[in-house]
Amino acid sequence: MMKKHLNMTIATVLLLQVGTAGLALAEDAKPLAGQHLSVLLPPWGTLPKEMTDGFTAKTGIILDTQTLGWDDIHTKIVTSTVANTAPGDATEVDWSWVGQFGASKWYQPLDGLVTADAVADAPTAKIFTYDGKLLAVPYNNDFRVLIYNKTQLEKAGIKTPPKTPDELLKAAKAIKEAKIATYPIGLPLSATEGTSTTWYLLTKAFGGDLFDKDFKPMFVDPQSGGYKALSFEIQALKDGLIDPAMTGLKDVEVQELFKSGKISFDVAGWAGNLAVYADASKSQVANDVAAALMPSTTGSTRTIGLPEAIGIPAASANSKAAAAFINWMLEPETEIGSFNALGNLPPRLSVLKQLNAKGGLKDGDVLLAQAAAVEPLFAQGTPGWYPEFSAAVASAINQAAKGQLTVDQAVQQVAEAAKTASQE
Amino acid sequence: MTATLSQKGPRRRYGEVNLGLALVIPVIVIMGGLVVFPLLSTIVDSFYRINLMRPGTPFTGLGNYADLLQDTSVRRSWVNTFYYVMMAVVLETLGGLAAALLLNKIKYGRRWLLAAVVLPWCLPPVVNAVVWLWIYNPSYGLLNGILQAAGLTSAPVVFFNDPKLALFLVTIVHVWRMMPLTAIILLAALQSIPEDLYQAAKLDGAGAFKSFRLITLPLIASGLAIALSQSTVFAFNLFDEAWILSGSSLDTRTVMIQVYMFAFQNMKFSLGMALSLMAMLASLLVSLVYVLKVYRETRFD
Amino acid sequence: MSSRSLKFISGKLGIVLAVVVLLVWSLGPIYWSVVTSLTSPTDLVSATPHFWPTHVTLEHYARLFGSTSMSQGNEVQSVWPQFSAALLNSLITSVVATVLTVVIAAFSAYAFVRLRFPGRDMIFVLVVATLAIPAYTVMIPLYRLMISLKLVDTYLGVSLIYVSAFLPLALWLMRSVYQAMPLSLEEAAWLDGASKVYTLVRIVMPLAAPGLIAAAIITFLNAWGQFLVPLVFSPTLATKPLTVLIPEFVGRNYVDYGLINAAGIVAIIPPVLVVLFLNRFLVSGLMAGATK
C-alpha cells in the first residue's frame, strides 16, 4: 500500500514537471522508454538495424520487427484480427486494403496521433483515408512511370521517348524490325495483381477511368479508356510486340527481363525501381536505362500511385509507441535512409525535392514531374471489394491474352465481376 | 483373435478396458481439442453470413452452400481439383509402388537410394515451387532448353498458355513432391512380408507376376489403402504449387485456392468455410471407397 | 544355361535402368536447384540455359553464412542470424512433433488393435477421418483457442498442432503394422505372466520397428515442410521455421532466385540426414524381427 502511494506521488510530481517544463522535456524524458513495440512489415519496409537502433536510442522503445511476405501479411492480419488480437502494434497497410480495413474498423484513425505537417507533405496520404479518417501513413511512394532502354531506342533511330500510346507502338515496331529486341514491350499478363494494375494505369493513359462516382463500370464502351487499354495490350501481343510468355510472368519477372536487356519498355515501371535498374551490380542495362512521363492520349500525363503505408490496428496495446514509430518513419532522415537502404522513394514531396537537389535521384526531374501527376486509383476511396474485383480483372486479362476471350468478352466479364463483388 | 480374447476372465477384461482407454486418452484429448472442436465451430459458422465488409452476422441456413453451387468460378475449381486428384492418385500410386518394389529388391546402397527418393519431399514447398517455376520458365527454363536441344520444338513454348498442359504441369510438381510418401508407406508394407512366403510360392512354380498378385498385393493392401487415401487428401488440398506457378488463374485454380480467396482476400469467411467443408466431405467420400474395399478384403484373412 | 544367365543379366540391367530413371526423376530438379544456387544473378537471366554452371559463384551461400552481405547494392547484415535461428526452430518443432506423434501412436494404435474397450472402432474411424480436414477449415477457431491457451509463438503450441495433424496417419500406419503381426508371440508372453504394457514395449515394439521408423520419417518430413501453420502460429523468430523465412527472400524489386535456391539446398540437409540415419534402423529393425 505504502509503495503504491509513493509511486502515485512520484507520478504526480513527474506529471507536474512535464506540464511546467513543456513538451521538449517530455521527449527528453522518453515517456515511452522500455515499452516493447512489434512492427509487422514486408522485407522492403524493414529498415536496417542501424537505423532502428537510432529510433530505440531516441525514444527508448524496444522494437520487435517481424518480416513477412506481402500476401502472408494480409493473411496474418485477417486471422489475428478475427481472433480479436493485434497482428502487431504497427503493421503494413497496402493501398488496396484500405476499403476492407476501413469498413471493418480494424485500424485506428491516426488523425491527431501523427505529425500533421508531415502528412500534409505526403500527397499519397489521401489514398489512405476512409470516411475522412486517416488510417495509415505511407512509407514509400510507389507511382508508375515509363521506364525505357535509351540505348535500344537510339539504335532504332528514336531520339525522344514516346509521348502517346501510338508512339509507343511505333517505337516498339521500329525496335522489333531493327532486330534489337524480339519483344520490345514488357507488361505482365499473368493472373496476378501486377496485370490488373498495369491495365488500370493504361486506362488512365487512354484518358479513361475505371468507375464513375457510383462505382458504375466505365470500361465497357469500345470508346472508353479501359476498353482501348485492353485492346492495346491484346493487339500489341498479337503483333508480336509483347512476348507471349508474359501470360505466365509476374511484374517482378518482367522487371528481370528489363534488367537483362531483353525488353525495351517497362511500361508500368515502378518509380522506385529506377535506382535498381541503374545499379550495375543488379542490372545489365545500368547505363542504358531512362525514365519518361507516362504516355497519354490527352496531352497531359496521368499516373496512379500504389503506395504502401503503416497503420495501427485497433487491437494494438501500444498505440502511443506505435504512433511514435510512425512519426519517426515520417522524418526526412528516416525517409532518405530508407531510400538509400531499400530503394523506397520518399513519400514526402519536400524530401523528394531535397534528394533530387543533391543529385541523389536518377532522372529526378522526370520523377518529380510524374509525382505531381499522381492520382489515386479510386477518387472516392478504395472500396472493400477491391481485392475480389482485382483478382477477376487479372483472370479476365489473362484469359484474353491466351485467346480464350475476346476483348469485348473480357471487359463484360470484368464488369460482371465488379457488379457481383460490390453487391455481396 | 476374438476367440482368444473372450477366454479371459471378467477381471482381466476390466483391466483391459482401463488400459485401452488410458492409452487412447492422449489421442482423444489432442484430436478433440485441436481438430474436432474447431471443426464444429466452423460448421456452425458456415450457416451464418460472416462477411467482414457487411455489418451483422444473420443466420442464412444453407444459403452459403446454395451460393457456392451457383458460382461459375467455384464450379471450375471443382473440375480442376477432380482432375488433380485423379491424375495425382494414379501417378503417385503407380510411381510410388514401382519405387518401393525397386527399393525392396535392391541390396546394396538402398539407404542412399531411399534418401535420394525422399529428397523432393524435403524441399520446403516454396522452394519446390520456385525451382519448378524456373524449370518451366519460357525464356530461361530447363524444360524448353531440353526440348530444343532434343529437337522436339524449334521455338520456346509458353507452357501455361495451354490450359490442359498447365493443369498437367501443376500435377507433375505435386506428384514429384508427394510420391515419396506413397513410396515409404508401401516400402514399409513390403518389408513386413516374410521372405519365406515367396520361397514357398517359388517352389510351387509361381512366376514373378503370379506371386506379386497372390502374395504382395493382398499383403500390402492396407498399406495401399493408407497411401491412396493420403494422396487423395493431399491432392484435394493442393494449394502451393498452383498458386506459385500461376496465381489465381482460372485454368489451374483449385478449391483450396478458391477457399483462400473467399476467406482471406475477400473476407467472406462463411463462404470460404462452407467451401472448405464441402472439400472435406468430398475427400472423405473418395477415401472411404478405398478404405471400405480394404476392410472387406482384410476381414476374410 | 546361357539363356538363364542372359535372363539374369537382362534382369540386372533392368534394375540398373530403373534406378537411373528413379534418380533422374528425383534428383534432376534438385540438381537444377544446386546449379541455380551456384550461378551469379546476372548469368541466371543472360544466356540460354546451360546444364551446368559456367562460372561457379558461392555468393549466395556467402550471404547465408557470411558476416555481411550485399543487398540492393548496399552492404547489409548477413541473413545468418535469422537463418540459423529458423533452422533451429524447424529442427526443434519437427523433432518434438515427431517424438510425441510416434510415442502416442505406438501405444494407442496397439490399444486399437489388441485391447477391447467401448467405442474403440468409432474413435479410430473418427480420428482417421480428420485426415481429410483442410487446414483452412479449422484455422480461425484454432487460432482463437491457441491464443486463449497462450500457446501462439511457442514451440509447444506449434508442435501440438503438428501432432494433431500427423497423428491420424501415424496411428493408421501403426495399426496396420500391429494387425499384420502374429498374435502367438504376445500370447506366449502373457502366459508367462508378463503384463500387457511390458509385452508391448519389450516384444511387440522391437518387431514393429520398421513401421515405427516409417511413421517417424513421415511425421518428421511432413512437419519440416509445413508453411501455413507456422505462418499463422509462429509469427516471430522465436519459433519461425525455415519454410516461412525463405519466402521473405522474395523481395519486391527483385526475385532472389540464387538465394532462395541456396537456402532450399541447405534446408534439405537436415531431413536427408534424418532419413539416412533412421533408414539404417529401418533395415536393422527388420533384421532383428527376422532373427528373433
Image: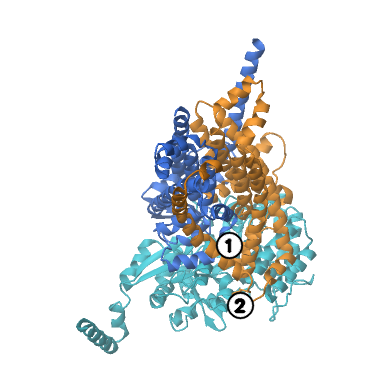
Label annotation for residue A230: none
Residue B172 found in image quarter: top right
Q: Mark 1 lies on which chain?
A: C
Chain A drawn colour:
cyan
Which residue position is annotated with label 1? Answer: C137
Q: Where is residue B124 in the image (x, y as percent from the top left)?
A: 51, 49
Disc 2 from disc 1: Cα separation? 19 Å
Task: Point out residue A17 in the picture as x, y percentages from the top left corner.
Answer: 25, 87
Placement of the C terminus of chain C among the 4 image quadrants: top left
Q: The blue chain is which one?
A: C
Quadrant for residue A55, please give it.
bottom left
Looking at the rendered structure, the kind of residue marked 2 is Thr
The N terminus of chain C lies in quadrant: top right
**Mark 2 neighbour class, 10 Å CA radius: few under 14, some 14 to 19, many 20 or more:** some
Can you give x and y, in whole percent of width and height, for residue A147 in the image? 60, 60
**In the foreground, B135 or B149:** B135
Q: Which residue lies furthest to the top in this view?
A: C1
Residue type at mark 1: give it: Thr
